[in-house]
Image: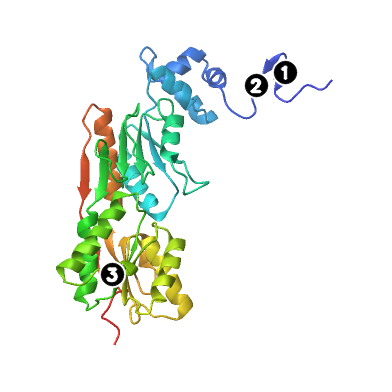
Amino acid sequence: MPVPDGVANGQFTSQRGVTIHDVAREAGVSPATVSKVMNNRYGVASATQARVKAAVTKLGYEASLVASSMRRSSSNTIGVLLAGFDPFATEVIKGISAEAVGKGYELLAYSGAIADERAVGWEHRSIQRLGGSLIDAAIVMTPTIRISGTAIPIVTVDPPAGLTDSATIASDNLAGAREATKHLIDLGHVRIAHIRGRTDLLSAQLREQGYVQALAEARLPYDPSLTLTGAYRRDWAVDCARKLLDLPYPPTAIFCANDWSALGVYDVCAERGLRIPEDLSVIGFDDIPEGHVLAPPLTTIAQNLPEIGADAFRLIRSMLDGGGSDNITVATTLMHRGSTGPVPA
């Protein structure tokens, strides 16, 4: 009978992964010594440590994260939980990772709802899967539910409405939306539509409030037919833009609750042969890189997304060190580019 791959002289060696015993043989030490070096324990001579580390590098060995965290009661890993790798999340992750360099923590980006972007409760399920074994704490982006009472520290970026008892990071959504709408009013627009965001999120609610406030401050009437829900999604925004432009008196400008929705408005303008901003002014919110390369480039309210990520990491690290939670608000900036202009003649 042929001997199965990996079995010889009654001893099994895996061809799919390097074990601690392989490292021990390569370095000429015991598996216990390898474990001490991998877990930064005392009692191993520096020359032996160097030999073990060289063997680890040569063989490409990595100790099991779960096993290591169980031994140390810590994984030194922070989870970054998100519904999907959209432009907003990607820019925030850039800030998190830049701030994490040299701080002794690894990051685990985990998309808990990538199979169904409308799945409710994905963040709770993700924390149950990862918390306490794979991650020590979590930064959660745009959750669908309130997160509180967890076994690990949590910082929420773009929190849901009603979240008052947890650490949060968000832009000044109210002021940014008011500035976006005022910018359109200053250009002479009076029929200004709003494609709102995900209505369960505080950011979307505040952006709608800022839009309404700016109209009131300019003594312009609020027309509910000009506000539709785009849920921060490009495909939904396409439907919204079509409905708005089909109105008997269509808007001359649209304030989109995020840049991704503004891209949907661009799509509709392209299919209908409308020029931006000559026929319709469009302004977004976020300042994602995709908006810079549009023709014309998108006027938007810039969130400092990398700074939001950096703040989130600093806050979660402080909480891991015993600090309290906090609610941080980051200022926004109007970026006037080519997609907004005067009212069509």
* Residue 266 quadrant: bottom left
Q: Nearer the viewer, mark 3 or mark 2?
A: 3
Distance between the Cα atoms at labels 1 and 2? 8 Å
Quadrant for residue 242, please give it: bottom left
| Amino acid at circle 2 | Thr
Q: Amino acid at mark 3?
A: Asp
Q: Quadrant where the C terminus lies?
A: bottom left
Which class describes the residues within 10 Å of circle 2: few (<14), some (14-19), or many (20+)? some
Camera-nearest label, 3 or 1: 3
Q: Which residue is mark 1?
A: 8
Cβ atoms at labels 1 and 2 below 8 Å apart = yes
Element under disc 1: strand
Which residue occupies the foreground of this view, 330 or 65? 330
Measured in 3D between alpha carbons, the distance from the residue under mark 3 to the one under mark 1, in whole angstroms, is: 79 Å
Identify the residue at image location x=26%, y=36%: 166
Label 1 sits on what residue type?
Answer: Ala
Q: Is residue 287 toward the left or the right of residue 323 in the image?
A: right
The circle drawn on residue 223 is 3
